[in-house]
Amino acid sequence: PFTVRASSQYTVTGEKAHPDLIHAYTMIKRSAAQANMELDVLDNTKGSAIIKSCDEILKNRLHDQFIIDAINSGAGTALNMNINEVVANRALEILGKKKGEYDVISPNDHVNMSQSSNDTFPTAMHVAIIVNILATISVLEDLIRSLERKAIEFKDAIKIGRTHLMDALPVTLGIEFGEYAYSLEIAKKKFYQAIDNLRYIGLGGTAVGTGVNSPKGFSQIAISHLSEISGLDLKPSPNIYYCLQSKFDVANCSSALRNLALELIKMANDLRLMASGPNAGFAEIIIPAVHAGSSIMPGKVNPSLAECLNMICFNIVGNDVSVALAAQAGQFELNVMLPGMTKNVLDSAKMLKNFLPTFAKNMVDGLVANSQTISSHVDKSPILVTLLNPYIGYLRAAEIYKESVKTGITVRQLVLSRGLMSKEELDRVLSKDNVLGG
């Protein structure tokens, strides 16, 4: 059989095709059989057996028979034939026949009827990616809610802002966490835009998009059935050739994952810096101790979950580079780099699905503002002199700044000792509302 020969050639990752890709492909075979029966090109006995076989796979049976490596032949022909042969052999058993009696039900002539690897694999990858991006959105929303709760909790925690990693004008810890939540909300919207494009598929285009060996009406009927069984509102593409030749929509989805990763990296880096210390760092937040931080230094607490998130996101960025190279590597009527692209996108989504709930629950939800340190940083920061520019002038404010840095005397003390402003006026200028631009 094709599958056995192919499996010996593609010993690449040690991982089999993603279960969601197998399910997506099986739904395609089921939908194709339904369409072919309705168009009277596949008799009902064979078609019904194929459908029953597909239903068993969709109930997570027979998965041990899908043995092709996740990265396999160009255009995924090896996986398509693995699916065809498993479906055909089980359909034969349902009819009381022996496996391999392909004169009765053939993997090519019946299960693959009206199809090609070139239109089915792009369709399957779209379906599998949509399913996984929707699951990623769900866990992302939970993280956003965790960050929004912290933004409210920390709304009165005034801290020193930083630009260029140097002291800048004050903000609140709540402002920073609110921004993290907002940036992830923007990333979520990009996911919805990306998967909307993936809903347009080219099933029925067969080998090069012309639909050769596919009966008239097959594409619309098969896609209608696939849309119903998947629940994903799939639609025929206005240009089937685009679905085979271009992988723009998959690359766009990968870039949405990458852009989310970039925002998560920035947030994780901020949290790691804010948690640095406890004595020789920023020490603005206290992080949950999820496990011992060191095998040699007792009591050490590391930002381990933020570090793990960084590493996950670095992998996602790398996966996107691979997808980008694969997306530009198509020639003429077909991009054949489909298995690699699919694996990378699904791997990126899988890591986020698996880890973001842990990060939200065990890191973000347990963060505590180190109020004493935060207040001390604000009180001692010479940068507060910026607020005095309209009252004492830039040059005099610069002198106060330098003196504060040199002596460690606070801006408040220097201004009052020199009689540059009254206590009442200084209190008003350095009040919370004024400090935050209120």
Image (cartoon, rainbow, N blue to C red):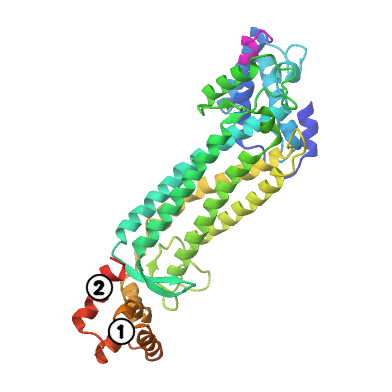
Name the N-terminal-most of marks 1 and 2. Answer: 1
Q: Is residue 292 visible?
A: no
Q: Quadrant of residue 16?
A: top right
For the N terminus, the quadrant is top right
Q: Quadrant of residue 314?
A: bottom right
Range covered by the magenta-colored residues: 34-41
**Residue ID at (42%, 73%):** 282
Q: Is 30 a magenta residue?
A: no
Picture disc at residue 392? 1
Picture disc at residue 223? none
Picture disc at residue 431? 2
Q: As displayed, is residue 231 above or below residue 332?
A: above
Q: Is 38 a magenta residue?
A: yes
For the C terminus, the quadrant is bottom left
**Residue ID at (46%, 73%):** 298
Task: Quote the CA–CA distance across marks 1 and 2.
Answer: 17 Å
Q: Quadrant of residue 278?
A: bottom left
Q: As displayed, is residue 291 above or below residue 136?
A: below
Most foreground residue, 75 or 237: 237
> Residue 29: x, y in percent?
64, 22
The amino acid at mark 2 is Ser
Most foreground residue, 238 or 136: 238
